[in-house]
Image (cartoon, rainbow, N blue to C red):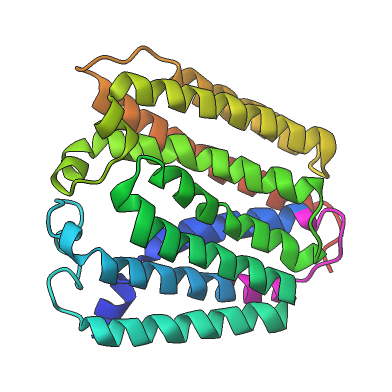
């Protein structure tokens, strides 16, 4: 029973988002005092809110999950977890997580994490995902909230650095998500989900991905020029941006698009892990209260 409820929170998604929370936290802590306990409680609270959103997503997507090979064995789709009980579970996670962020960090962080929840649950899951090719863009907004919350937990204010951080993760989400949609196109067709590679074709999706990667590179370097990131960040950012650009700009055909999109996806993970890790390492060389 517990294992079933854990599975519908999508632990993999939670872990990925918590890495970005830490990235935002580490960046803010370069210039503001912070503590390990604040990081822990912020990540725990944000993780609960993300888990709640994932549970609601699983409840709402039961019909299309059954049509996709990747998701057809999910507990809610198979009826192995009661949907009403799962909804109550999601509410408990949402309320507890929001309260924890509010008390441990600040009200601004709590408001922002709730806004991210609204975008993910209502605008993405319940509206745009099934009806518009722009669903991925809407989803990218909610996906960029966790690092922003990590940043605001330390600073309690929005500045140019926070805006750049939010933009960076919004832009990162787009080629990352399009890559998944490309090598999972059959699933998305079966479920009638209008992602760009299905609606407009591989070549147009590739052009969009290239444009987003270029924009990501610009923002990544702007974060060094206008923010608190150090030269270690610049070195790692240069390396991972070069890797991602090189892979994304490779020629794509009907024969190699699956392998190409998987490469773009894998490198996107290296990018987010690299940037998050270097910010943490930079922090270790400075004062951490």
The residue located at (80%, 45%) in the rendering is 160
Q: From this viewpoint, is residue 51 visible? A: yes
Which contiguous range is marked in magenta? 28-43
Quarter of the image with the N terminus is bottom left
The residue located at (45%, 26%) in the rendering is 208
Picture quarter containing residue 83? bottom left
Q: Say left or right for 201 vs 162.
A: left
Picture quarter containing residue 108? bottom right
Nearest to the observer: residue 181 or residue 288: 181
Q: How many marks?
A: 0
The residue located at (33%, 76%) in the rendering is 6
Magenta stretch holds residue 34: yes
The residue located at (58%, 76%) in the rendering is 45
Residue 70 x/y as whole percent: 20, 52
Quarter of the image with the C terminus is bottom right
Magenta stretch holds residue 66: no
Residue 7 x/y as whole percent: 29, 71
17 versus 221 height, above or below: below
Q: Say left or right for 11 vs 41.
A: left
Nearest to the observer: residue 90 or residue 39: 90
Residue 274 x/y as whole percent: 59, 41
76 versus 140 height, above or below: below
């Amino acid at each position: 029973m517990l294992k079933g409820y854990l599975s519908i929170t999508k632990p993999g998604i939670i872990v990925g988002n918590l890495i970005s929370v830490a990235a935002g936290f580490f960046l803010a802590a370069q210039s503001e005092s912070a503590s390990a306990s604040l990081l822990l409680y912020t990540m725990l609270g944000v993780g609960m809110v993300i888990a709640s959103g994932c549970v609601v997503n699983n409840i709402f997507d039961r019909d299309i999950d059954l049509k996709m090979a990747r998701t057809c064995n999910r507990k809610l789709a198979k009826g192995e977890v009661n949907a009403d009980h799962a909804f109550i579970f999601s509410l408990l996670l949402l309320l507890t997580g929001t309260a924890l962020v509010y008390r441990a960090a600040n009200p601004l962080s709590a408001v922002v994490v709730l806004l991210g929840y609204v975008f993910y649950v209502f605008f993405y899951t319940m509206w745009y995902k099934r009806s518009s090719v722009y669903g991925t863009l809407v989803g990218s907004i909610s996906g960029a909230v966790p690092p922003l919350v990590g940043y605001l937990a330390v600073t309690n204010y929005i500045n140019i650095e926070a805006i750049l951080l939010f933009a960076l993760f919004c832009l990162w989400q787009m080629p990352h998500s399009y890559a998944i949609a490309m090598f999972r196109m059959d699933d998305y067709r079966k479920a009638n989900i209008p992602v760009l590679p299905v609606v407009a074709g591989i070549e147009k999706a590739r052009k969009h991905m290239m444009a987003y990667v270029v924009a990501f590179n610009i923002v990544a370097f702007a974060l060094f020029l206008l923010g608190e990131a150090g030269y270690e960040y610049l070195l790692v950012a240069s390396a991972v941006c070069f890797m991602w650009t090189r892979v994304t700009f490779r020629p794509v055909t009907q024969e190699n698009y699956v392998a190409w999109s998987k490469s773009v996806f894998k490198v996107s993970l290296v990018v987010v892990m690299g940037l998050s890790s270097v910010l943490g390492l930079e922090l270790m060389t400075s004062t951490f209260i």
